[in-house]
């Protein structure tokens, strides 16, 4: 999986997580409008956070990469395919 594919995987997970939390808060599905608003309001900052995180190079990115951590006890570097 390329670094861009890893990023897109994690970004989708983050959007799903945030959408789920919003759905719990408002007690209904926030719908696709929430996703479009998330992309417009948070996608750029999420990309920057991802690029500056340990997660983008970690073999555990599928489990916890959506947290875009700068410090992590589980961090294990994996080979990156471009």
Image: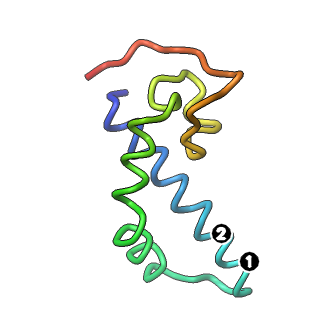
Residue 56 position, x and y percent, is 45, 31
Q: In this image, 9 relative to 64: left or right?
A: left
Do the residues bearing badges 2 and 1 touch, measured as CB atoms within 8 Å?
A: yes
Q: Nearer the viewer, residue 73 or 7?
A: 73
Residue at 62% in and 60% down: 17
Mark number displayed over residue 20:
2
Q: Is residue 71 above or below residue 64?
A: above
Q: Is residue 28 above or below residue 18?
A: below
Q: Position of residue 65 (x, y in %)?
A: 56, 38
Q: Which mark is residue 24?
A: 1
Which image quadrant: the C terminus? top left
Mark 1, Cα crowd under 10 Å, few <14 / some 14-19 / many 20+, is: few
Report x, y in % for residue 18: 60, 65
* Residue 48 position within the rendered picture, expressed as x and y whole percent measured from the top left: 37, 46
Disc 2 crowd, CA 10 A, few/some/many (<14, 14-19, 20+): some
**Residue in front for this viewpoint, 24 or 53:** 53
Vertical comparison of 68 with 25: above or below: above
Under circle 2, the secondary element is: helix
At 68% from the left edge and 70% from the top edge, which residue is drawn? 21
Residue in the foreground of this view, choosing between 1 and 37: 37
- Quadrant of res 74: top right
Q: Residue at x 74, y 86 (%)?
A: 27
Q: CA distance from mark 2 to mark 1?
A: 6 Å
């Amino acid at each position: 999986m390329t670094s861009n594919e890893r990023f897109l995987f994690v970004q989708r997970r983050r959007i799903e997580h945030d959408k789920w939390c919003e759905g719990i808060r408002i007690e209904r599905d926030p719908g696709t409008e929430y996703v479009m608003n998330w992309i417009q309001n948070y996608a750029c900052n999420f990309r920057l956070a991802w690029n500056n995180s340990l997660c983008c190079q970690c073999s555990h990115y599928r489990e916890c990469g959506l947290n875009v951590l700068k410090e992590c006890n589980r961090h294990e570097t994996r080979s990156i395919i471009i």
